[in-house]
Image (spheres, grey):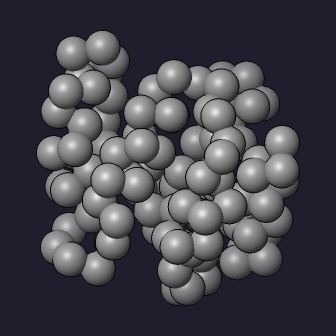
Amino acid sequence: MHKEEELELAALRVICQGAEGKPLWDEGLRLLCDYRFRTPVHQVVFDALRRIRSPREGALCERLQRELVLALARFPGLNAAEYFQPHGLSYRGALDLLARLGEG
């Protein structure tokens, strides 16, 4: 995986999971609203997250998987669980990552 792909994946994981027990959903969606993901599958996942709007209602991983049903035809290996793997970032590091991508 290339560096840009790794950063995008980490950013999506941060949005899905937060960091240090703190949510980053709203902040992540806001900071990356104009970012164009270089990896098409990451753009599809981000668009699906925006359609969900709130992680608070029900199990987010299952909701994301349902949103991605149509995308599965284009990306057969797509698995929502990948976005819930540990990202290893602190809260500050996660915010920095989102801000850097959002600026870029």
Kindly tell me whether residue 82 is visible in this rendering.
Answer: no
- Snapshot quadrant of residue 19: bottom right
Position of 73 with respect to 103 (left or right) is left
Kindly tell me whether residue 45 is visible in this rendering.
Answer: yes
Query: Which residue lies at the image location 20% right of the left edge and 77% below the top edge?
Result: 57
Front residue of 12 and 99: 99
Q: Is residue 62 above or below residue 28?
A: above
Q: Quadrant of the C terminus?
A: top right
Seen as rendered, the residue at the extreme front is: 34
Please tell me how many numbered marks the rendered image carries. 0
Question: Residue 69's spot in the image, x, y percent?
Answer: 17, 33
Question: Residue 70's spot in the image, x, y percent?
Answer: 19, 27
Query: Which residue lies at the image location 60% right of the left edge and 52% below the top edge?
Result: 33
Query: Which residue lies at the image location 22% right of the left edge and 44% below the top edge?
Result: 67
Q: Is residue 10 above or below residue 16?
A: above
Query: Which residue lies at the image location 68% right of the left edge and 61% below the top edge?
Result: 31
Front residue of 28 and 18: 28
Seen as rendered, the residue at the extreme bottom is: 21
Position of 89 with respect to 64 (left or right) is right
Q: Quadrant of the N terminus?
A: top right
Q: Is residue 20 above or below residue 38?
A: below
Position of 58 with respect to 77 (left or right) is left
Question: Residue 73's spot in the image, x, y percent?
Answer: 21, 15
Front residue of 17 and 38: 38
